Image (tube, grey):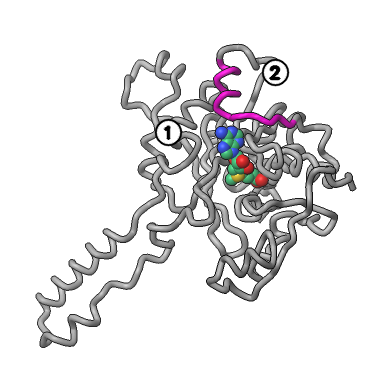
Amino acid sequence: MSQMPKDMVKCKICVLPSRTGWPALEAHFSELCLTLPDWYSRHRLFSRYDEGILLDRESWFSVTPEAIAARIAERCRCNVVLDLFCGAGGNAIQFAMTCNKVIAIDVDPIKIEMARHNAAIYGVQDRITFLVGDAVEFCRDWTEGREGLVDIDVVFLSPPWGGTDYQKGQADSEPPAPPLAASLLDESFDASATEKRKQSADAHTKSRYTHYPLSALSPLSGQDLYAMASKITPEVVMFLPRSCDLDELSRLPLRHSDQDTDSEGENERPILSIEEQFLGSSFKALSVYFGSLATDWDDDRETGYA
Ligand SMILES: C[S@@+](CC[C@H](N)C(=O)[O-])C[C@H]1O[C@@H](n2cnc3c(N)ncnc32)[C@H](O)[C@@H]1O
């Protein structure tokens, strides 16, 4: 196991059966307060967690669980993969198992140190080039020829979704129950009134059930992130919230170079393939594949990953 970087202190973790609702109290006891379910999920994030994996507060809630990262890495098997938002290394480590070279970038130097340390635990640090920097700047430099030292086969993006509260203001996968009960109390039974109530309840449900908009991603909107990555290669993967609007995804514009050669004109859209990522029975996220990653993959192929 590699040594912990000198300037890094392992998070003091306090595990609570549930949130107290008093953040100041939680903060007093630890740098990082986890609930029991969060703590029990540690081996799902990294199966080798007990060998000294380092995670900071943000990474606990944003690292891609190992089985999902392995599944994505299997589909992205190639020579060089660019992981633009590598965080604590959840995806980068798995890419290093299926690809010859990984370029892993994060704007936060602590994340890069954690990712380097975590990669050493898995014995794959030599296949990963870690860079501290801004993903947008890197892509701009690469497309302008300043970073183009190697050919990049696949670009992977798992941008920040907006913290643990990213679903606030959006309904969960279960839409809320329609408010029928109260109105049934004050009216005698009447089929047409019941139908009207149902319509109004449906409208109420729809108004509360909103999707995660691609504009909420950072540091750029999903549309701009895709445009940026697809200038490097058509082989792009985006790891996105499960509540993304599939219609919005399907309206992503065609990449620039394809527009030039495309005689059909502006209504053409890139072909994409969306994989729903489950961990056990829990629906975690969407992986959206573009280019030949979308068209040349056999869904029935046995990968050995759940
Ligand atoms: C969702 S996390 C990535 C998790 C990672 N895939 C994993 O499995 O460990 C998003 C990461 O993007 C990084 N980030 C945010 N803005 C960035 C930028 N402009 N350029 C590069 N990295 C950025 C954050 O520091 C954070 O570590």
Where is 51 relative to 263, above or below?
Answer: below
| Location of mark 1 (residue) | 223
Q: Residue at x 41, y 49 (%)?
A: 212
Q: Quadrant of residue 14?
A: bottom right
**Residue 167 versus residue 19: which sits nearer the camera?**
19
Mark 1, secondary structure of its residue: helix
Marking on residue 109: none
x, y (%) of residue 110? 71, 41
Q: What amino acid type is highlighted by mark number 1?
A: Gln
- Side (left or right) of 242 relative to 64: left
Residue 40 drawn in magenta? no
**At 55% across and 40% down in the image, what residue appears?**
159
Total count of labels: 2
Q: Residue furthest top?
A: 145
Q: Is residue 166 above or below residue 126?
A: below
Which corner quadrant of the figure contains ligand 1? top right
**SS class, disc 2:** loop
Identify which residue is drawn at 47% across, 41% down. Answer: 217
Question: Quick check: is the Cβ at mark 2 less than 8 Å away from ligand 1?
Answer: no
Is residue 235 shown to the viewer in this render? yes
